[in-house]
Structure formats: C-alpha cells, structure tokens
C-alpha cells in the first residue's frame, strides 16, 4: 500500500525556482525559509504553509486533496529613516513576485492553482534602520 505524499514541498520548490529565475528579482536574496543573519537589504523568502489535512484517513491510496495558504515574505531594509523609499521598493518586489505567480498559476502543473489571496504590510524601524515587510498569502490547491 502506498500512501500519497503532500504536494507542499513540490509546489514550494517550483515557486522557488520561478522566483530565482525572475529577472526583476536579480540581486535579491530569494530562498525557502527565513534567512538567518542575512546581510542583504532586499529579501524574498518562501515562509510558512498553513493547511488543514484533508487526506482520506481510511483510504490513503485515494487522491489527496490539499488546500493551504502559503506565505511569501518580501523585505526591504536600509539605513536611515526613509520609510517611503523602503515601502516603494518593497512594492516593486511584490509586483515581481505576484507577476511570477500569475504567469504560471498551475506552477508547472504541480498544482490545480496557486493564486494571490491577499497581503499584510508592516513598517518597522529602529534608531538606525527602516524595514518594509510584505507578507503575501497564496491560496494553493492540489490533488495528487
């Protein structure tokens, strides 16, 4: 008996490859997982995936329906106090990420769909730096 595995890792890997290949994100740190001690001022990372498991409990060989929210975090920080410039650049990167997702909403046929579902904007500052962080939520649906 074979148990069907989750599509989450495959979709995340496909998202990563698409974002890393995007010309508008050249020079931006793009990876899976929160960067630890990153020195770059511009970061895009594939964050948390939140899902309720809908796999058939009594019949693990039946197709597995999955629907989850996938976070992509865009962060722009720099020294000084110009939050407006930080926010403007963050939205340029947000546009690149959103366009990458919408260009291939089936993620190279790894998903039924992966579509933007909303975002959260945060403005952060301390005495030396400002940061704008946009957390994009993607609505993901797969059957395998």
Image (tube, grey):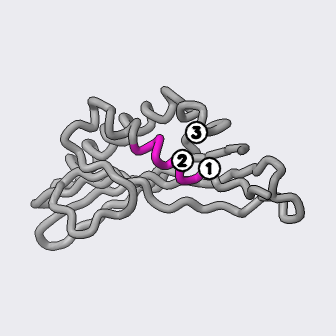
Q: Nearer the viewer, residue 60 or 139?
A: 60
Q: Residues within 10 Å of mark 1 (few under 14, many from 20)?
A: some
Outermost residue toward the right in this view = 58
* Mark 2 neighbour density, 10 Å: few (under 14) some (14–19) many (20 or more): few
Residue 114 or 133: which is nearer the viewer? 114
Q: Earlier in the sequence, mark 1 or mark 3?
A: 1
Contact (CB < 8 A) between labels 2 and 1?
A: yes
Image coordinates of residue 5 in percent, x first then y, are: 66, 55
Residue 6 pos. (x, y %): 64, 55
- The quadrant of the picture occupied by the C terminus is top right
Judging by the rendered image, the residue that carries numbered circle 2 is 10
Separation (CA) of disc 2 from disc 3: 16 Å
Asked if residue 13 lies in the magenta stretch, the reply is yes
Q: Which residue is mark 1?
A: 7
Sequence order check, earlier mark of 2 and 3: 2
In the visual, does 122 lie left or right of 40? right
Q: Quadrant of the N terminus?
A: bottom right
The residue that label 3 is drawn on is: 115
Say if mark 1 contacts mark 3, CB within 8 Å: no
Query: Which is more foreground, mark 1 or mark 3?
Result: 1
């Amino acid at each position: 008996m074979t148990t069907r595995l989750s599509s989450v890792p495959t979709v995340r890997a496909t998202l990563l490859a698409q974002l890393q290949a995007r010309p508008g994100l050249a020079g931006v740190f793009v990876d899976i997982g929160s960067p630890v001690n990153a020195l770059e001022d511009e970061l895009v990372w594939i964050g948390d995936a939140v899902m309720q498991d809908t796999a058939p409990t009594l019949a693990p060989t039946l197709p597995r329906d999955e629907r989850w929210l996938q976070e992509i975090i865009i962060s722009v920080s720099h020294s000084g106090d110009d939050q407006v410039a930080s926010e403007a650049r963050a939205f340029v990167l947000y546009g690149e990420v959103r366009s990458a997702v919408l260009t291939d909403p089936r993620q190279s046929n790894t998903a039924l769909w992966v579509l933007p579902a909303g975002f959260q904007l945060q403005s952060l500052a301390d005495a030396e730096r400002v940061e704008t962080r946009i957390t994009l939520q993607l609505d993901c649906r797969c059957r395998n």
